[in-house]
Image (cartoon, coloured by chain):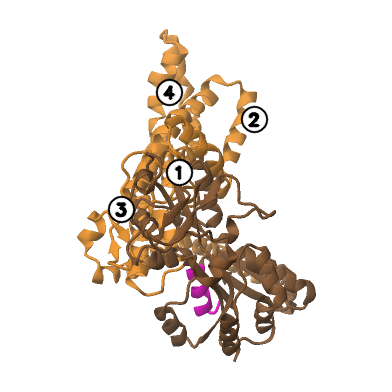
Amino acid sequence: MNFRKVLIGFICLSLLAAGPVFAKKKMIQVKGSDTMVNLVQVLAEAYMEKNRQNPIAVLGGGSGTGIAALINGTCDIASHSRPMKNKEIEMAKDRGVIPHRFIIAVDGLSVIVNEKNPVSKMVMDQIGAIYRGEITNWKEVGGADWPVSLYGRQSNSGTYVFFQEHVLGNQNYSQDMKQMNGNAQIIEGVSKDKYGIGYVGVGYTLDSDGTVRKGIKIIMVAKNAGATAYSPLDKAAVDSGDYPVARPLFQSSAGTPQGAVLDFIKFAISEEGQEIVEREGFFPIGSSHQEENKKNMK
Amino acid sequence: MKRTSWIKLKESAIRAFLFTNGILAVVILVGIFFFLLYTSIPAFREVNIKEFFLSKNWDPTSPVKAEFGILSMVVSTLMVTLGALAIAVPIGIGVASYLSDVAHWRVREVVKPIVEVLAGIPSVVVGFLGIVLFGPAIAEVFGLSNGLNAINGSILLAIMAMPTIISISEDSLNAVPRAYSEASLALGASRWQTLIRVKIPAALSGIIAAVMLGMGRAIGETMTVLMATGNAPAFPKSFLSSIRTMTATIAIELGEVPYYTTHYYALFAIGLVLFVITFVVNLISDIILHKYQEREL
């Protein structure tokens, strides 16, 4: 008899506990690129200030992780700093998800070294050779006789893939590269390592007051040996494509964006959203990107 | 009459409930093993087994040629684990001896719980210590440019394995019958001689089991090594190289791997190898521990 009472009590209790969960409104889940996570977080906060009825949860984890989550249906929007691979698009379609892609910002991917390193300019080929492990001493690129200590991202990072394709010429990374778990860890590592070199989203190179972070130096990059070297902080050079490692940053929705998802993406590419993009150290999108976005809304 | 049958029913229900609980752990263990085996085997359709175990190159996402060799990470895992034991075992046994033989009982009552609390520190926190505290210190001491290497990992894992080693070693030292040490002292041995030549040998199987359990903890640890060892996949040249362990590789790559590909299956194959290693280590410690409990009786 007693036993049954306990059982009934248990059921009542669990129903009580579960009640609020059922009643809660569905949150929009945004997941993916670690390069973009701070930016998206700030965008989401600004958006939620005006639209309290549409809560948004922002998670990092890397572009690959976000895209996988979109394919598996565990997030509403994937942030990714590299385009989706054909394989991923096919896989998504197999599962009935048709990704719609929007460009929300432009990033001047920055190559950084320790502030004590005398090197301040490099050519794309040199950076590629360093990361492929062909150049292992700074003196080969005009620096001191120091060994090179490589910092990079892990293979679930969009930055890792983008850098491999565009800077390493689609060759293998050196096996000696330290694979760090996020932009912040690369900054932390390079700022403490005199011999270090790393690559991070430009938004991470600046402090909250807009100055370059302590301990690191941003390398000016030239397309080839004869060309002028530009800094990723130079907005005009990034816009015109003179800075060679600029890239668009994406957000993709599963299918045509609707309701709050559409609303949030519209906010991100609105004038107000783009102001936030700039404040966070990235670059606003141009008119050709805006048009592409409009097409993908349908 | 009705009452007794109700009691009997209740009795057997409780018995069945407890039996299910007892058997559950076994079912889970066997289930995990077969799941790992089942998801690992497809990897070897494309990867040569010999290459898998003997190649030093692991680069499954390479645009040139995907490579699946786990030798570097197995060696890395063994390096940090043995490094951790080299630090944790002497200190651990020292602390255990102090607690069981030297310390006043009041001191022991305070210190032992504190040591056990050490086991509860989350691994992320320990990893963070590795990045901000031990890393720069190691770089300074060895004249390196950074401290993200095997030594850093070893020190952190030593910190994590120590509570287990201290706690179980101390228990087994305490379990040595008083008559042993009394006899030794009566024969004129000093307390140091009694500890080294009588008590520690008598408690040795318990101490070895403690070390093996600590080792099991160190091998399987993920977050700490992921944060503090730099994760360079190259074959380690020395304790001062950056290394990437088996657990770190799984943690880094499983999140993004496309399902049901060779890469996916290969990650489970690493998991299987890790499972077998920890299983063997735990089995050995269990056998030793049993032996020691029998002797005590």
Label 1 sits on a secondary structure element that is loop
| Callout 3 crowding tier (Cα within 10 Å): few <14, some 14–19, many ≥20 | few
Residue sitting nearer the eye, A263 or B33: A263
In the rendered structure, the residue with mark 3 lies on which chain?
A
Q: Quadrant of the N terminus of chain A?
A: bottom right
Displayed quadrant of residue B28: bottom left
Region of the chain picked out in magenta, as a range: A63-76
Q: Amino acid at mark 4?
A: Lys
Q: Amino acid at mark 1?
A: Leu
The residue labelled by disc 1 is: B148
The residue labelled by disc 3 is: A134
User: Is B282 above or below relative to A125?
Assistant: above
In the rendered structure, the residue with mark 2 lies on which chain?
B
**Dominant SS in magenta:** helix
Decide: marks 2, 4 in contact (CB < 8 A)? Answer: no
Decide: marks 4, 3 in contact (CB < 8 A)? Answer: no
Q: Which chain is orange?
A: B
The residue labelled by disc 2 is: B110
Give the foreground label among 4 and 3: 3
